[in-house]
Amino acid sequence: MEFVVFAQQVVNGLVNGMAYVLIATGLTLIFGVLRIVNFAHGEFYMLGAFFTYYVVSLAGLDYVSATIIATAVVAAVGILANRLFFWPLRREHEFTILLSSLGLALLLTNGGEVVFGADPKYVSSPFSDEIVEMGNLIVTQQRVVIFAVGVIVLIALYLFIKNSRMGKMMRATAQNPEGAALTGINIRQVHTYTFALACGLAALAGALVGPTAMIYPTVGGWAVLKGFIVVIMGGLGSIPGALVGGLALGVIESLGGGYISLGFAEAIGYAIIIIVLLWRPQGLFGTARRA
Amino acid sequence: MASKLLPLIALVAAALLPLLTGSTYFHHLMVLWLLYALLALSLNIIIGYLGELTFGHAAFFGIGAYAAAILGMDYGLAGIPGILAAGLVAGLFGLVIGYVALRIVGPQFAILTLGFGSIIYTITNYWVDVTRGPMGISNIPPLTFFGGALTLESAQQYYYVALICVVAFAYACYALVHSRTGRAFIATRENPQLAASIGIDIFHMKLLGFVVATAIAGIGGALYAHYVKVITPELMGLQYMSALIIMVIVGGRGTIAGPIIGALIYVGLLELLRPLGAMRLVIFAALLIASVIFLPGGIVSLWRRYVEQPVLRKTATPQPSATVEAAE
């Protein structure tokens, strides 16, 4: 019996972790390719969840199409955000860009509160009420969907970055932006694609996780904090780091919440970063400039 | 000459300001202004002089507030010793956190401080036995001096206490920037490798600046707790953190007048825009973005640009905006 409880916690943790991975992958992609720390990343998660909610409740579409539409729309919003807040500042100091993204985060959170209202909303999904039983473990279908979609999207992303023309251009830009530009790579296009991909991933995470909890306009702050923990743990700019870090954070939080205290589960994530950074300041898979 | 007189004129004006109106509402706003100015000045040491962005500063403000409230109410350590103890506690936290976080630089440092700030926020929220959790601590006694002989009651009295703190700290910043240590800060900010090559111990220099900044934030928090009398974990939340950053950036980082003016703009605009409700924070975000994009040196850079001639200045005062402008 004791083992079943433990296994259940691990499974729950892996599902939560997959959501963190989706959030953190976008964050780490933008940093890895463009050297931008996007503080507003969580807001795209928030927008993804809210757009899904509105497409379901106002347009009356089903949850799956709503998720696809919301992801596409938020990817477009990401392209717009890049044009307005990031692309014009590309030659400025990294703090200027970080502060600009902080401004964008505040703009979207507070704008979201004005437009969507501050009261929590609930995204309804047909998968929320169905239960999957695996032996003694019980998981809702929605959580299976989160994990499955996460795996598929990550494999697709891996193949895209490894094989496609744009993926190669992104990797070249990540290695050396000036060298990449010299060989004729259109940096502006790389910016656009990276932001579209990253914001789309965040929105997808929002649309998937939305039905498992209430959504409210300040949820982006939560999302970006989780994303930051994961990327700092795994190493900023490293996609394998985001995968390992995200799943590890989910499982550790779940076990910590189950066996120690639900409240301190939140703090455990941060405690892990400190331990990891004392040992490896650049994160598990990353490289960082040291003082 | 004018640059020597200007701070004196500003000081006299600030000292006379509360006498212009009998309205306690205005007095309250002025106290808030000075308390935020103290916090923004301390944050400016990290952002403006050390050249590192921190997202954890509001946490030290909160630590100071909680330390003052808990020490004052449960351990009888009130008045000046209580405030100094609050600064000490915040500084100790700053020492530990700085020791870990300052090992890395740039965006990673910013994110790491955000993580530390969030740990402190989370612990404050859940450690109900000590901090009383999300309800916060209320009925904090007012500030007393000389063993209870003088108790601060009115906003006007707090204004003068806060003014003394701001002036003392602003002067300390001025002296620091013109000292050997201050020049080492600037050298570290401008070029860490070069600074290290001429024998500056960068890590300890940064740690020193970080600890001073966090201790002052703690003192600011202690004053805030005694003045407002109610504190909640929200003091450490993202809202206060971004507010402090807005003050420093919009006012002008790396200057002494900048954060004080930034705090005035923050408090003033927030009150003026109050009728707009939730929209006012949207306007604030837009203000931050506009300032970052169009006025990277903050409001005070306008003064330099239009009032003083944009010639090279002889003083060693750091002008981050000047370097930005020169680079353009």
Image (cartoon, coloured by chain):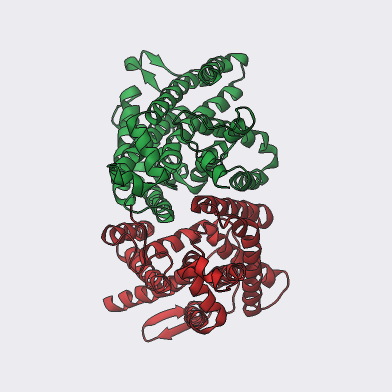
Q: Which chain is green?
A: B
Who is closer to the viewer here, A44 or B49?
B49
Residue drawn at (30%, 51%) of the image: B100
**Horizontal and vertical percent for residue B226?**
43, 28
Left or right relative to B182: residue B289:
right
Left or right relative to A1: residue B302:
right
**Horizontal and vertical percent for residue A230?**
41, 65
| Residue located farthest toward the right when viewing the structure as drawn | A59
Q: Colour of chain A?
A: red
Image quadrant assignment for residue B141? top left
Who is closer to the viewer here, B108 or B196?
B196
**Horizontal and vertical percent for residue B142?**
42, 24
Residue drawn at (66%, 70%) of the image: A73
**Placement of B163 over or under A176, stated as above or below:** above
**Placement of B27 over or under A291, stated as above or below:** above
Residue drawn at (59%, 55%) of the image: A89
Q: Is residue B195 visible?
A: yes
Image quadrant assignment for residue A196? bottom right
